[in-house]
């Protein structure tokens, strides 16, 4: 691949150029036995029991940022959605929309990152598609992934399963992804020393479930952040949530950047953290399991579900006040994922 | 929904506006029991045996065209890829990338069309996602769908299964979709009286398989058209293909438009037609099955697979010549699907 090659419209035409792109970039980095069928659709043995299926589109700007890029993010985002329902992610599909003029080297860097992330997450990319649109009709590169996982018998997790008395945990610091993208995009010229937390969470979920089989639900607080995710859970479960601000882990660099940029970390996107709601008596076991995992070393119990005023999310502030958290409203950070 | 409402960035932020859009447009038109779980991912009973999985992104310009729109196309394109491997399509995921400023009424028209197409094709949309990008960062609306189907035991279809002596059939006229999009986009001010053929093909495949259980493969000649699809099959199977131009069905209006626009219908996209390669002795049965189906009334046997010079596709022209067909090269029609 020449250094300065770019995407042309005929790369999306379904002819010879499309096939060459497929072979030189996609097959090279995403190869596996199912994708190698190279047909209209992939055929595979049905995993038994129940399937977990999810989809996400990724439009993050910029494509490359401290801690990751759109390629690994497109893997993590979808395998994490599957994992939040308790599914073990097995397969991904990947659809690309490319802007004419995109540097082929950038595309290959993204696809290579996807390949590494898929291998790390234990999933195969089994079907793909590429479309090309003209200059100015898309911004460089968008990716959609759909994920298929298998769900163990008897496992029932979901946003409506929280009960009054349950503990609320998070697996680590909040806001790292959101603040990093914001800083990268603003071209602030500041080195905020933050990095995206983008990471695959299925192993962490499995560890927590082994230690805390009664876990009610997992949720990865991506767009909308912790506050929006908990508000949705509170409404779906018919409970209120009470959070202790002092217990919520936020990295020093993120807290500083939020102050500088005027952002609330409770509403920032995370791409490698999860919320877990668990029965109070299993909360310490869940916490220990999180802390025993590489991705959960700053896990914390941050609050509890209560019966009064279902649907509300309260924050007991560090200075002794009490604040009601609503869903994210407005768009502080477009194209965060 | 007010008449003049448009998509705003906060519709993609994952907060309150996102949820309202989900409820008012997506849930309204795509409702089913699985989608109603409204969680990070959908859980469903695994269909038995083998799965067939495919994905496609849709960037067609314009969004609405004679015979269809991007919404029904996004259903048909993916269920057809599943059907071409013999799969019965069951589930779809749908990921939307919306441009800020898109009219909500246009979005709803697209999603409603998707809902009707899904119902007609017998599939449920079980998971979805919406992202919004700023003005000028996408062209109105892109859709990605991934499809999951189930494959009957013992059924083995694929591009590498054609054998010398087999018959090559098409289920109807070629080029209708490609010419229609081209004419719609050029704003030629001509009424070419053509319509896209966009349609779901799984029932047609099932009818052909019932009559012709030895069918080797099906392929829907979308981007790249008949010529590119047959070239791929010839290469994958290690046979040559010999086509009779006079036998290839092309609607009069399409032939006229192709002449006017300087297009070759053998390279134009189709969205509701299939190629079938079948053993010669079952070809008449396959043809009769196609003609007995609403979507196959102009089906024809258009040629045969031969052993000599594997990988080549020959066209015996109507005037008695012989022409070699190569894969599509260049991009005559960007954003055709």
Image (tube, coloured by chain):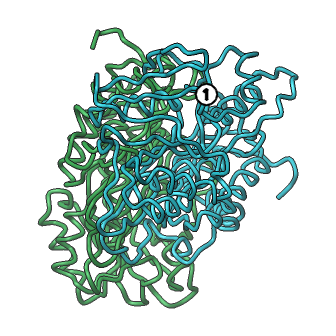
Chain colours: A cyan, B green
Choose top left, top right, bottom left or bottom right for residue B133: top right
Other residues around mark 1 within 10 Å, as few (<14) / some (14–19) / many (≥20): some
Foreground: B41 or B112? Answer: B41
Foreground: A323 or B90? Answer: A323
Q: Is residue A186 above or below residue B203?
A: above
Residue tagged 1:
A246
Tell me the chain of label 1.
Answer: A
Q: Is residue A87 above or below residue A7?
A: below
Foreground: B148 or B253? Answer: B148
Residue B225 x/y as whole percent:
46, 57
Horizontal arrangement in the rendering, residue A233 relative to residue B259 (left or right):
left
Q: Quadrant of the C terminus of chain A?
A: top right
Residue A34 x/y as whole percent:
51, 74
Choose top left, top right, bottom left or bottom right for residue B196: top left
Residue lying at 53% horizontally and 63% vertically, measured from the top left? A207
Residue A261 x/y as whole percent:
72, 16
Is residue B187 visible in this depiction of the protein? no
In the image, farthest residue toward the left: B292
Q: Secondary structure at mark 1?
A: helix
Number of dots carrying numbers? 1
Horizontal arrangement in the rendering, residue B104 relative to residue B207 (left or right):
right
Residue lying at 24% horizontally and 65% vertically, measured from the top left? B299
Horizontal arrangement in the rendering, residue A266 relative to residue A2 (left or right):
left
Is residue B95 visible in this depiction of the protein? yes
Q: Is residue A273 above or below residue B249?
A: above
Q: Is residue B262 above or below residue B315?
A: above
Residue lying at 82% horizontally and 58% vertically, measured from the top left? A1
Residue B231 x/y as whole percent:
52, 71
């Amino acid at each position: 691949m020449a250094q300065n090659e770019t995407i042309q419209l005929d790369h999306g035409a379904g002819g010879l150029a499309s096939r060459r792109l497929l072979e030189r970039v996609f097959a090279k980095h995403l190869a596996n036995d199912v994708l190698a069928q190279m047909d209209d659709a992939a055929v595979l043995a049905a995993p038994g029991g129940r399937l977990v299926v999810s989809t996400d589109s990724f439009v993050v700007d910029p494509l490359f940022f401290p801690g990751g890029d759109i390629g690994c993010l497109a893997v993590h985002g979808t395998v994490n959605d599957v994992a939040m329902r308790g599914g073990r992610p097995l397969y991904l599909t990947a659809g690309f929309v490319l802007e004419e003029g995109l540097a082929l080297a950038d595309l290959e860097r993204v696809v290579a990152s996807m390949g590494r992330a898929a291998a790390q997450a234990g999933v195969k990319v089994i079907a793909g598609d590429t479309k090309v649109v003209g200059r100015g009709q898309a911004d460089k590169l968008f990716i959609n992934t759909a994920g298929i996982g298998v769900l163990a018998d008897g496992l029932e997790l979901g946003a409506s399963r929280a009960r009054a008395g349950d503990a609320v945990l998070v697996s680590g610091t909040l806001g790292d992804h959101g603040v990093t993208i914001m800083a990268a995009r603003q071209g602030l010229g500041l080195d905020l020393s933050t990095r995206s937390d983008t990471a695959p969470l299925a192993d962490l979920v499995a560890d927590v479930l082994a230690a805390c089989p009664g876990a009610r639900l997992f949720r990865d607080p991506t767009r909308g952040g912790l506050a929006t995710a908990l508000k949705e859970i509170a409404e779906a479960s018919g409970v209120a949530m009470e959070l202790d601000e002092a217990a919520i882990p936020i990295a020093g660099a993120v807290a500083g950047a939020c102050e500088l940029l005027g952002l609330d970390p409770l509403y920032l996107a995370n791409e490698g953290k999860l919320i877990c709601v668990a029965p109070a008596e299993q909360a310490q076991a869940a916490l220990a399991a999180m802390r025993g995992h590489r991705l959960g070393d700053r896990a914390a119990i941050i609050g509890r579900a209560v019966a009064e005023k279902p649907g509300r999310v309260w924050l007991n502030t560090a200075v002794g006040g009490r604040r009601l958290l609503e869903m994210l409203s407005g768009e502080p950070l477009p194209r965060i994922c």
